[in-house]
Image (tube, coloured by chain):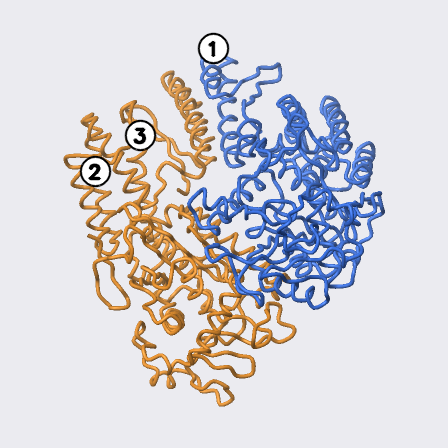
Chain colours: A orange, B blue
Amino acid sequence: MLTIYNTLTKKKESFKPLNPPFVGIYVCGPTVYDDPHLGHAKSYVSFDIIVRFLRASGYRVRYVQNITDVGHLLGETNEGEDRILKKAQLEHLEPVEIAQKYERHYFRDMDALNLERPDISSRATGHIPEMIELIQVLLDKGYAYEVHGNIYFEVSTFSEYGKLSGRKVEDMISGTRIDAMSEKRHPADFALWKKADPEHLMQWNSPWGKGFPGWHLECSVMAQKYLGETIDIHGGGLDNQFPHHECEIAQSEAANGKPFVRYFMHNNMVTLNSQKMSKSLGNFITLTDLFDRYGPMTVRFFILQGHYRSPQDFSDTALEAASKGFNKLRDTVINLKKHVDDGYKSEKQVSGQCAVFRTQFFDAMNNDFSTATALSVLFDLSRFANSAMSGDDLESINYALALFEELGEEILGLQFAKQGDRVEDSAEDALMEIIISMRQKVRAEKNWKEADRIRDLLAVKGISILDGVEGSTWKKAVKN
Amino acid sequence: MLTIYNTLTKKKESFKPLNPPFVGIYVCGPTVYDDPHLGHAKSYVSFDIIVRFLRASGYRVRYVQNITDVGHLLGETNEGEDRILKKAQLEHLEPVEIAQKYERHYFRDMDALNLERPDISSRATGHIPEMIELIQVLLDKGYAYEVHGNIYFEVSTFSEYGKLSGRKVEDMISGTRIDAMSEKRHPADFALWKKADPEHLMQWNSPWGKGFPGWHLECSVMAQKYLGETIDIHGGGLDNQFPHHECEIAQSEAANGKPFVRYFMHNNMVTLNSQKMSKSLGNFITLTDLFDRYGPMTVRFFILQGHYRSPQDFSDTALEAASKGFNKLRDTVINLKKHVDDGYKSEKQVSGQCAVFRTQFFDAMNNDFSTATALSVLFDLSRFANSAMSGDDLESINYALALFEELGEEILGLQFAKQGDRVEDSAEDALMEIIISMRQKVRAEKNWKEADRIRDLLAVKGISILDGVEGSTWKKAVKN
């Protein structure tokens, strides 16, 4: 039975979706104005595994993620400069070009991490009419007010404001910079619609003049449009809990008079020297850089080694350890593939010790997605598999590979077989086999000079040869 | 000087953009409800080359393409069933899921064909407010009328209706099925906005009730939003000339009182046994299938062999001929790369015979993009290059490669070097180099048995070795 830590109630709860076996999950997606960094990977890998595990558990999941291509302003109450617009000015491009460019980079990096695409990736600019309608409802119901073409949500009208983050409206004044010139009734009131200057590049007509939507609004609108007024799971980074998710709750529940979310899930942050990694702090590492150094599967493995609700400190040591760990499992899987039956077919029916591993794995995942424990089961399985291979225990070999495929590849999304490109591997394997066999002959003839020449040529290509008593093996210094 | 056949005037004209060096080009993109087929490739490869050539000629091009994800109805006056909605019902998915799925397939196939992405790929659903505004303008100016929540453009109010296709409004009755129940004032009037049934999955609020936009509308709106009221080039398939482009002209010019398009360009169709290849006729070949059989570069080459304004008949014979032609050029380029100077750097300054080839190529392309003639120049260049290699004429070798890179790769978008994956190639090349060198030693020792063993091992992997007097070369039997 799956239990989930619900940030709304601050405790682990049994997971009961509204209309089983259907599960609707909404996860806050990226604001597409810059390249994805490790913090994004932590969030989206975490929710990818959650969705994969729900599916493996028999749920029929609809996974919605937004793409913020307008309105994500700087500053806590969403009143600063638009991030995409600012970048557009920097790069001398149209806002839409910036958004499309970085949306492409986002999917490029998420694809490399082997994330399943959301069923729906919806863009804020594709939902302007729906946002205007929601604002109108909030105005009509007295939860929002207009000042000079700007519309604000009045937090004091929604008595439950603060229930997610635990903040109280009355305490918020002290935490907010007091702006004597502010037109807002309360410093914590947040923008639903901002009036646009004539030169503003992204603006739409509305009943209140030309303007653009506030950032929080899009998530209320898209979650409702694609998943209904009450959704099962809402996910996002811990840094979105306040104000973003708190504002979403206020908007949706004020408008619909129904609970917005049954289970709120927040992933913790990636830190660098214990400081949060983020674009605004400028201490981020882009995924492109990381992939160059370690490969996407090592990054994925690194994230799985932590728990989604725990902060995770980035360091080269940690990534190198992740690389070793991943390669250990990978080597086992590749060996298993060489050892299995000719008629091998991946099956989910396993028995004996493998059935025990499977139960342990599901127990770990059912316990609020304890991926680190789930990985430790895979290491136990790896030891078991290696001894099965030494003992030529074909049944165990077949079961072990089936488990690696189901638990490791399907649920945890680790691509064991793929290293760089699949095609490259197979060509490389075949050619290396030939080279090794040729070099064996040379060594048999005690032609050490030629054997060394070959070894050196390969070394230049990053391939090392290890000569043992039973023959030579090779290894490539590559990123996985 | 570039001349373009302008479908508006039915003649070749000198190309003069409105604000040189800037060129705005809008090309009708796909309706994302099914997999792309060869007809799409013909259209988008043609305009890709047009954009590439404009850029190579010094123009600064903004290339906009729409993605139709709502409102493309069946039937000539845009009043049948919505294509995406119909497919959504078939696949038991939401319309937005259908649109996103096939948009991804579209870009997957276009990327494989080595198309440069448009600067802006704009979705119809992202422009609903702007479409509603344009309808309002047309209503206010008396070009449109409302009946029961539907808005129609009244073609008789726009005296120039028919100027692109040459059709006359008065003749259109006979060509259109007379529907006694029709609420339209004239059978040729077309829908700007359609009222939606309550169960319709794609609908938005409007001043005229809930509904959705007509297909023609999005192109008028997006062209104007991203390229201004008058655009330099509007492209699309010949089958879009009427009614789609005719309707676009009517909408835009009626609303703005300005010419909409300076140069209209239409690509002709791909035929199968002389019948147009299209989804509605059910005689299409998907690009995935074609790529499996011939590889994307052969498909691209096939399209280049025709002229964009000529129909092109698909047959296996034609594709096999294209494959041969492409491989001929490719082999020359690969050989040139082995022969060039160590310090080789691609330059656009060539002289002698190569300068003549370059002029011939540009002349062909300047003549309404005569790609077939341009290709014939590349075959002349290939012969020239081969004789330069025989004669070890290093300067000509360098120039020839530079020309292949500029004219073949950059302008015509042919990927000579890439065969399968670039990464695979480099690893394979390096290992093959080692194998060949080892085998050379074996042959020097007259150890024919081992040399043959190696050749046989490689043959199993699809690699053939050719032993010549000056050493051995290798070749892989793959699709390009």
Question: Is label 1 or label 2 in front?
Answer: 2
Residue B368 percent location from the top left of the image: 79, 40
Which kind of residue does numbered mark 2 sit on? Arg
Q: Residue at x 71, y 45 (%)?
A: B242
Query: Left or right: where does residue B51 sit relative to residue A158?
Result: right
Q: Dot 2 corresponds to which residue? A: A383
Q: Are marks 3 and 2 in contact (CB under 8 Å)?
A: no
Mark 1 — on which chain does it sit? B
Mark 3 — on which chain does it sit? A
- Dot 2 alpha-carbon crowd within 10 angstroms: few under 14, some 14 to 19, many 20 or more: few
Mark 2 — on which chain does it sit? A
Q: Residue furthest bottom?
A: A180
Residue B318 percent location from the top left of the image: 66, 24
Q: Residue at x 69, y 56 (%)?
A: B185
Query: Left or right: where does residue B111 sit relative to residue A328?
Result: right
Q: Quadrant of the C terminus of chain A?
A: top left
* Inter-mark Cα distance, 3 to 1: 35 Å
Between residues B279 and B67, which one lies in front from this camera angle?
A: B279
* Inter-mark Cα distance, 1 to 2: 45 Å
Residue A33 at least partly seen: no
Q: Residue furthest front?
A: B180
Between residues B406 and B342, which one lies in front from this camera angle?
A: B406
Q: Dot 1 corresponds to which residue? A: B447
Q: Dot 3 corresponds to which residue? A: A337
Question: Is label 3 or label 1 in front?
Answer: 3
Which kind of residue does numbered mark 1 sit on? Asn
Which kind of residue does numbered mark 3 sit on? Lys
Query: Left or right: where does residue A327 sit relative to residue B215?
Result: left
Q: Are marks 3 and 2 on the same chain?
A: yes
Residue A88 percent location from the top left of the image: 60, 64
Where A175 falls versus A3 (above or below)?
below
